[in-house]
Amino acid sequence: MFKRVVPVLLLSNRGLVKTQKFGSPKYVGDPINAVKIFSEKEADELVFLDIEVSKTGADPDFALVKDIASEAYMPFAYGGGITNLSQADKILKNGAEKVVLNESLFSHPDLVAQLIQEFGASTVVGCVNVKKDARGEYALYSHKESKLRPESLTSHLKLCADLGLGEVILQSVDQDGLMQGYDTKLLSFVRPHVKVPLVALGGAGKLSDITAALNSGADAAAAGSLFTFYGKYRAVLITYPSYKEIRELTK
């Protein structure tokens, strides 16, 4: 069975940005133009994460979701600032197929059950940020507060399972944007704790990294920089592997 290869696009103030280790966001272009290119290249699906609204507490950008849907010829998920059922409903009605929750898994765990009851488990995705602590141990990380969280990673993964999420995106903060490969040890560690589809995110720099992630337990490989930058000087160039390349990587 072939597995998915998913571009992840970070949004900030309606622009497309890329980060390194969750910091230093660099503007890399217009998200709608990127959607058009990924549509032309027949990407499997897209994930949009608005890193600005999750910091400020603002509402999701519903108009931008609608604009994305008008150009996306593939399913896409949207995350950022979702704290209630009404917001998720509007995002889905504006064209997204899935909603992604991160901070709300801690602050509004009851929201997951509401969403699943209303829209089905396959519509609700959890995003888990992981960063090594001072001892080199894997710990949960809050993008909103820019610090490690007190909960243990394994207890949070159990919570994700108990909540009934449709899939889990596992994001390595330490590898984010470095293009040095996924944290395959992290994937292998987490895999036994996640019974739903597991999506690897953070670190892909070449196509063979995708295969390494899938061989380490991921059901799908997601990436941002790999599909946004080209060459050693990181020139902005939106790319996506051909159908043949993806099938070779994921079969």
Image (cartoon, rainbow, N blue to C red):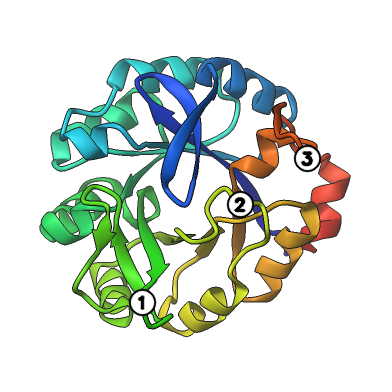
Residue 181 in the image: x percent, y percent?
A: 67, 61
- Left or right of 201 on screen, residue 42: right
Q: Which mark is residue 178?
A: 2
Q: Going 30% across and 30% down the picture, which residue do you hit? A: 91
Q: Amino acid at mark 2?
A: Leu
Q: Mark 1 and mark 2: span between their CA atoms?
A: 20 Å
What whole-number distance in Å separates the C-alpha atoms at marks 3 and 2? 12 Å
Which type of secondary structure does the marked residue at label 3 adopt?
loop
Mark 3 Cα-neighbour bin, 10 Å: few <14, some 14–19, many ≥20: few
Which image quarter holds the C terminus? bottom right
Mark 3 vs 1, N-terminal side: 1
Mark number, residue 188: none
Q: Quadrant of residue 78?
A: top left
Q: Residue at x 38, y 23 (%)?
A: 65
Q: Determine the CA span between mark 3 and mark 1.
A: 31 Å
The residue carrying pointer 2 sits among few (fewer than 14), some (14 to 19) or many (20 or more) residues within 10 Å by Cα, namely some
> Residue at point 61% right, 56% down?
203
User: Which of labels 1 and 2 is toward the front?
Assistant: 1
Q: Do tag 3 and tag 2 residues touch (Cβ < 8 Å)?
A: no
Instruction: Report crowding for label 1: few under 14, some 14 to 19, many 20 or more residues within 10 A (C-alpha).
Output: few
Residue 11 picture location, percent across and down: 42, 29
> Label 1 amino acid?
Ala
Question: Relative to residue 37, is residue 51 drawn left or right?
Answer: left
The tag earlier along the polypeptide, 1 or 2, is 1
- What residue type is disc 3 on? Lys
Residue 237 in percent (x, y) is at 72, 26
Per the image, the residue denoted by label 3 is 232
Decide which of 83, 70 is in the foreground and name it.
83
Above or below for 64 versus 50: above
Q: Which mark is residue 134?
A: 1
Q: Is residue 80 above or below residue 196?
A: above
Count the marks: how many?
Answer: 3
